[in-house]
Image (cartoon, helix red, strand yellow):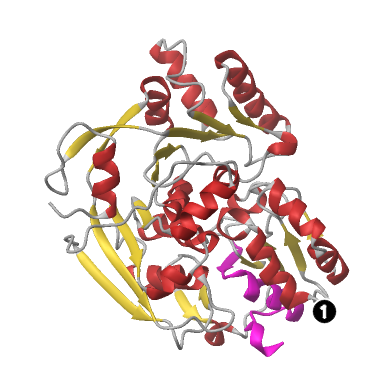
Amino acid sequence: MRQTLAQKILQQHTDEPITADGQIISCRVSLVLANDITAPLAIKSMRGMGVSKVFDQDKVALVCDHFTPNKDIDSAEQVKVVRDFAREMGITHYYEGGNVGVEHAILPEYGLVGPGDIIVGADSHTCTYGGLGAFATGLGSTDIAAAMALGETWFKVPETIRVTVTGTLPEYVGGKDIILYTIGQLGVAGALYKALEFGGEVIDALSVEARMTMANMAIEAGGKVGLFAADAKTLDYCQAHGRHGDTALAADPGATYSRELSFDVTTMSPQIACPHLPDNVRPVEEVSAVRVDQVVLGSCTNGRISDLRAAAAIIKGHKVAKGVRFIVIPASPSAYSTALDEGLLRIFLDAGAIISPPTCGPCLGGHMGILAGGERCLATTNRNFKGRMGSLKSEVYLAGPAVAAATAVTGHITHPGTL
């Protein structure tokens, strides 16, 4: 059987021969993840099961990133539950304080995820690690509790949609624009419980960080996973972040897909997802009259060092528009440190931006930038549902880092090339 990437990775973690999509299989997992919102629920479930230890202290990661630094007493209590559990269980990979960042940014940087892995996380954007060739997906907290106890879980082998991207990327167009365009084509339920497998010359040319941006948003089309072949770039990235022994991984030629989607990006403009769904996508030129009150650069989608560099290159020498709040959130301590060393934070500060410590913050309406009724925000985050970033009467537009920086300067959604 010629296998898709999803089938190939799952086969490496099960003793059952995979013969068709839709098959139910039991798989060993490489890593189990939870955060300060979802871990307490999983911990409660584990207690209810009578479980006294996790299956492997080195294969559970607990990342307190959503409401940290703690914004109130409730969030402090949530983190304390996770902290105490991590100590009790001897969890190796517990992150809080100076070593914490957005979970889906720090785990690749800490070398905890890579090609061929199966990662399950109590967070829908766990699919980020598909950018490294991992089968990574979100589960509910009860399933995560079982995975932490047993080291395995079950899957239905997903059908795969193959997305082939050709042409040459224009200036200011990147992974975020490609995935927004893809979601616009598929719809928010177009890949429900399917794997999105990306390939083509443009994908081959993308950086690993751009691939993770795309994999991150597979869930916004309903996808179970977003997958990229593990090539030389992937292996170099993993080795640079402390992983050794990974090998290249790709789908078999001639594998069968449930659907194939192909498009050329040569003439693509930066893409904008308009309220209130990620599939309400338009070229930037069509929404350039939309004024904003806030711009957010960050999140597990676009808070990495490459994103900070792209935004700094646009905003350097400019000032944030009067009446606009520009919030910059490096997604990891490494991104923050590198941005500091390269002078990027100085560029943002000189422009009038607000620099936040690494956190999920406003992305989920947590803190560090909540919207009031009637306010609009352009963000490099991944979700723009009604009320996502604050008031139900606010609006969120999604874009890439270059558009975010340009928009902060003008006060309305702006193509970076017009600066």
Check disc 1 and report its element: helix, strand or loop: loop
* Front-lying residue, 414 or 253: 253
Measured as percent of width and height from the top left, residue 279 is found at 41, 68
Magenta run includes residue 418: yes
| Category of crowding for the residue at label 1, using alpha-carbon neighbours closer than 10 angstroms: few (below 14), some (14–19), many (at least 20) | some
Name which residue lies at 56% across and 31% down.
62
Measured as percent of width and height from the top left, residue 111 is found at 55, 41
Badge 1 amino acid: His
Measured as percent of width and height from the top left, residue 227 is found at 37, 56
Q: How many labels does the image show?
A: 1
* Front-lying residue, 79 or 275: 79
* Front-lying residue, 114 or 397: 114
Residue 221 location, quadrant? bottom left
Name which residue lies at 39% across and 14% down.
49
Residue 138 location, quadrant? top left
Name which residue lies at 16% across and 61% down.
256
Magenta run includes residue 220: no
Does 180 sit left or right of 414 as displayed?
Answer: left
Task: Say whether residue 401 is visible.
Answer: yes
Task: Say whether residue 192 is visible.
Answer: no
* Front-lying residue, 353 or 148: 148
**Residues in magenta?**
393-419
Q: Mark 1 points at which residue?
A: 318
